[in-house]
Image: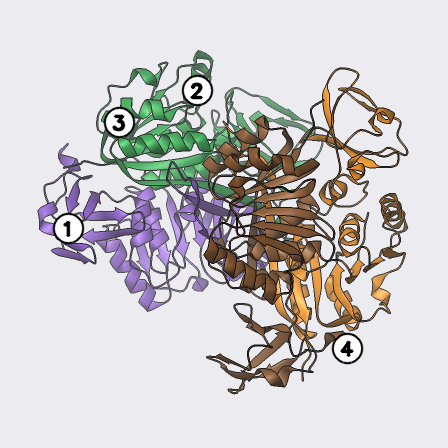
Chain colours: A orange, B brown, C purple, D green
Amino acid sequence: MENNKIKQNDIVLIVYDNNHKWLIDLSVQKEFHTNKGVINCEDLIGKEFGIKIESSLGKPFYILKPTIRDITLKTKRKTQIIYPKDASFIIYFTGIRSGYRVLEAGVGSGALTLALAYYVSPNGKIYGYEKNETHYNVAKKNLEKFEFDKVVDLRLKDISDGSDEKNLDVIILDLADPWNIIPKISGCLKNSGYIVCYSPTTSQVEKTLRILKSHGFYYIHTLEILCRTWQPEYDKLRPNTRMIGHTGFITFAVKVLET
Amino acid sequence: MENNKIKQNDIVLIVYDNNHKWLIDLSVQKEFHTNKGVINCEDLIGKEFGIKIESSLGKPFYILKPTIRDITLKTKRKTQIIYPKDASFIIYFTGIRSGYRVLEAGVGSGALTLALAYYVSPNGKIYGYEKNETHYNVAKKNLEKFEFDKVVDLRLKDISDGSDEKNLDVIILDLADPWNIIPKISGCLKNSGYIVCYSPTTSQVEKTLRILKSHGFYYIHTLEILCRTWQPEYDKLRPNTRMIGHTGFITFAVKVLET
Amino acid sequence: MENNKIKQNDIVLIVYDNNHKWLIDLSVQKEFHTNKGVINCEDLIGKEFGIKIESSLGKPFYILKPTIRDITLKTKRKTQIIYPKDASFIIYFTGIRSGYRVLEAGVGSGALTLALAYYVSPNGKIYGYEKNETHYNVAKKNLEKFEFDKVVDLRLKDISDGSDEKNLDVIILDLADPWNIIPKISGCLKNSGYIVCYSPTTSQVEKTLRILKSHGFYYIHTLEILCRTWQPEYDKLRPNTRMIGHTGFITFAVKVLET
Amino acid sequence: MENNKIKQNDIVLIVYDNNHKWLIDLSVQKEFHTNKGVINCEDLIGKEFGIKIESSLGKPFYILKPTIRDITLKTKRKTQIIYPKDASFIIYFTGIRSGYRVLEAGVGSGALTLALAYYVSPNGKIYGYEKNETHYNVAKKNLEKFEFDKVVDLRLKDISDGSDEKNLDVIILDLADPWNIIPKISGCLKNSGYIVCYSPTTSQVEKTLRILKSHGFYYIHTLEILCRTWQPEYDKLRPNTRMIGHTGFITFAVKVLET
């Protein structure tokens, strides 16, 4: 079980409770301060993942191995987060897994990119486009931090200038005007491959659907995923009072070949 | 692009529209009959995926490469389906990907097993438990059909007799009484690993939560995922009238180590 | 408790279970036939509401006093039903009760009209517009059956020709193009009165919002109401598998006075 | 249109936008201060409802006639609010309108009581039970403020001591243990009348269902109502990011007579 021991350069998830948790890079941080006391990070090294420790104030914390969900929820960002409910559904619907070649335009802070990189590793490739330099730099650091910089070819480029990639398995557009981009990049996608557009408003969806139907796409699905969290208490089980009521509409379409 | 050509033993998705689609095994089926005419399956071989063809009645069909979503939705079953919204979220939340070792109890017809096998391939392993022989046989055939029988160790066994596996990454319980099983198999899970319980009723969730809290699990989340499909028409965009209002509640918990 | 006895010309709700129930007019129907046996309607007269009876096949049925919800759900119709979740919210949001004067355009089969009439009775008034003669006749019969024909002034007229009413408390538009009608009838509404538009698609909502903002309306709310029904079994409590995922978007706006 | 003029003792709704609105009693308040400037309340008297005015800082406000929804949302409270989505559905499902006699136990701050009183006025009656003196006093003031103290017989009493009322149309239980109360008050309800239980947790619902089935209730419905609000902007129409994910489960049951 060597691989379940905490190592010097691990990134760990420190959990107080479901709403108080932190992603800590042990190679950088030597002490971790919260209002519930201090944790000495060096003490963690060599311990097993899953361990319970006490802060300087005697409060209990657990040290967990973060999953890709924890990572995308807690990574540094300057843009809108991609929620696990949406990232997971996009990945599964299109079948993205080890070996896939995916173009993502509108990388933002790179949260979805991290998830895609996690799933296409080690043999696949993500071609990431981001035109805003600040976002590009945040995304770059996030990818380096989790060692996905080899799997992701991150480009400080505007996708509206097109792309030279060919035979991509999936294209994901998380930007304001997918209808302007689709005609420029549909040639990069292999036949029977998926394009995915993620948009917050219905008028964006309407414009996207119009273009998809006139540019050789079929098997089109538009949907939204809702995650309703419950209070996990056996004697007072109930949905939480507040929930995220909307993130974005997801449209999937397959590139087809007319004969 | 050789790999995008339809081959003699491929399983293809034949799509008329979103609600009329079929998974066809070309190695078995030579002709495909619908009320919209006949398709000669042998004509498809050598064509490119994504192609449009016409049935004997002149109706248009597209031949697509099925994704894991299509496969789990359309595979043969005798038990309740696992919906893509739930399968994808379980996989992502726990980080299941290539190399993971997962125990699944309550395999049923094997739809979730197919999805898990797809994601842990090629180096991971699924240990599947199913005590009902009819279900076991259906699952076995489904796994063979998609060539996942090497990745899945399928067992005609009752999980309530326990398991000898050790240091599993994830355990998934899709059966009627997870609270009876948890104490018997929590030793198979590595520390910081996830257990996932999938249950339709709230009293099942209540009993599961009670056991999890008294058996060394922490970071517990109970939630439900809803997928609201929309009519993908740009001039009359709207949610569909009918939706699946419930499948199951998903409870996630991490095994922790008390010091 | 005389008033709780079933009378010769009552309309009763006969309930086998939640999914098998019928609205029966005792003044018309002498026998009621189901695949669970025959009920002699004349036997019911003089019995108390709430009574359990047996059909000719020995099956149990309950005879209940229908509420306005039962009536609108079960009344004869040729058009889309208005669901209780929507009718109730429209009535409450706008405060419609005894004495209110309401214009409804797009009466259809009159289900919402019945609900409005029930609430404005006895002193209020509904001005109902329906241009389709078939629908008008169905609505007329429904209103007569429940003796709301005095409260409702039903008109076989196209609302796009305008209306002469003044100082109405509420206007409800349940028709395809509210944006064309609003400019023609906003003069009929009193200041601080509500207009309500009920539309299934987002492009209808978009056009409606544009017109409302340019025609003196404020305090605008667009929303949708979802009713998730549960299986009412104490040992297997759970939401039902299927639910109505969409009926219509409701937009409320108040007529204001610029100074 | 005299009745549409603002009078000296009116309670008005002052609206800046959908999220900034206030219920102001003109008989009490002479000036209204916000961070958007001061409004002189005496200036409003004699003006027409729906009017736009400017604060001392030149900001625009509208003066509207509040509906029962505005009143229940904005009234003074020390307890959990009853949301319009729930109040409206309870009222409609049970058919509560002018003339109804309703017992409500667990009055709290009286928000639902206000709504019930509004609908049963002028000839109906609400029998309100509240055992907590602080809540009772808040509710009493709220009812007096809106002149519903004649329609509501408010009692500082514990409903677990039972009630002497007979032949009630509807009983509403908004308290922690409806299963303990139902046997004590079901005799107060007329046959074919409705009992309504409003509870936040599933274990409360389970216990309630068990008692209802063993105490002569039938035609039982358990459900939850969700209100999803949208951003009412025609060029960026979308659901709001945050929504109320849960308030309470509502269980309806009809009292029946076994023969």
Residue that sits furthest to the top in the current view: D133
Q: Nearer the viewer, residue B199 or D70?
A: B199
Near mark 2 (Cα within 10 A), the count class, few <14, some 14-19 or many ≥20, is many
Look at 68% across and 78% down and name the residue there.
B7
Residue where numbered disc 4 is placed: B2
Of callouts 3 and 2, the N-terminal one: 2
**Amino acid under disc 2:** Ala
Please give the chain letter of the residue carrying mark 4: B
Residue where numbered disc 1 is placed: C55
Q: Are marks 2 and 4 in contact (CB under 8 Å)?
A: no
Please give the chain letter of the residue carrying mark 2: D
**Amino acid under disc 4:** Glu
Q: How many marks?
A: 4
Q: Nearer the viewer, residue D60 or B132?
A: B132
Q: Are marks 4 and 3 in contact (CB under 8 Å)?
A: no
Picture quarter with the C terminus of chain D: top left
Say whether residue C213 is visible: no
- Taking the image as shown, residue B207 lies to the left or right of residue C138, namely right
Q: Are marks 3 and 1 in contact (CB under 8 Å)?
A: no
When asked about the image quadrant of residue A150, the answer is bottom right
Near mark 3 (Cα within 10 A), the count class, few <14, some 14-19 or many ≥20, is many
Q: Position of residue B194 (x, y in %)?
A: 66, 39
The Cα atoms of the two marked residues, 3 and 2, are separated by 25 Å
**Amino acid under disc 1:** Ser
- Taking the image as shown, residue D223 lies to the left or right of residue A36, namely left
Q: Is residue B200 above or below residue D78?
A: below
The Cα atoms of the two marked residues, 3 and 1, are separated by 27 Å
**Amino acid under disc 3:** Ser
Both on one chain, marks 4 and 1? no
Residue where numbered disc 3 is placed: D186
Residue where numbered disc 2 is placed: D139
